Amino acid sequence: MKSITAFVVRAISVCAKNAWPVIGLSVLLAVLASWYAATHFSMTTDINQLISPNIDWRQREARFEKAFPQFELIVAVVDAPTPELATLARAELADKLTADSSRFKSVSQPGGSQCRASLDSGTVAPQSSPALRSAAKVRRLLFMRPCSLSHAQNLASGAL
């Protein structure tokens, strides 16, 4: 314990006697460390690149996704004041996306049911119910399957 204390005392006395060279060396080391970090470290938020694809469970996941490609979906939620306007907006969006076959493999509109689940209470009410018509917003879903990951990223960023 005494040797550690003696070392710390000697280091402090050397730094105190040579304050300006120590400050200059510290600034130089900070600049070099910052440069190294800026040029050599990178980070991605793509979950497919964060975990190695060579791990057993990732290989099983890749085989599963290849066997069942329906999981490559983008879901668009269309909000409108009334069910009719939400349905019209969803249909118009679906028509425009279906026409862009270079970017989307398929576009589908779920629904057609006489019932709609209420998003707040968890109850089910008929679509013609006054309770649903008076809701602030009605939501409709639209499922899209992009042709590539870059198209999905562009759609998510609003670049399309």
Image (cartoon, rainbow, N blue to C red):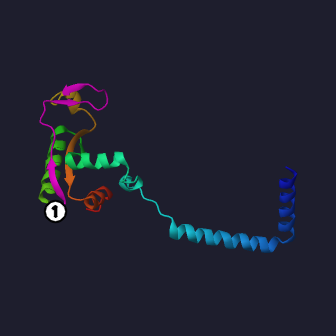
Compared with 24, 75 (above or below) is: above
Q: Position of residue 92 (x, y in %)?
A: 14, 51
In this orientation, does residue 75 appear? Answer: no
Q: Which quadrant holds residue 6?
A: bottom right
Q: Position of residue 76 (x, y in %)?
A: 24, 47
Compared with 43, 145 (above or below) is: above
Q: Residue at x 51, y 64 (%)?
A: 41
Asked whether 145 or 15 is in front, the reply is 15
Magenta stretch: give its range. Answer: 102-125
Q: Which quadrant holds residue 152?
A: bottom left
Going by the image, does 110 lie left or right of 75?
left
Asked whether 19 or 160 is in front, the reply is 19
In this orientation, does residue 109 appear? Answer: yes
Q: Residue at x 20, y 47 (%)?
A: 67
Label 1, residues with CA under 10 Å away: few <14, some 14-19, many ≥20: few
Q: Position of residue 125 (x, y in %)?
A: 20, 26
Q: Residue at x 30, y 55 (%)?
A: 156
- The residue where tag 1 is placed is 102
> In the image, is residue 41 part of the stretch drawn in magenta?
no
> In the image, is residue 119 part of the stretch drawn in magenta?
yes
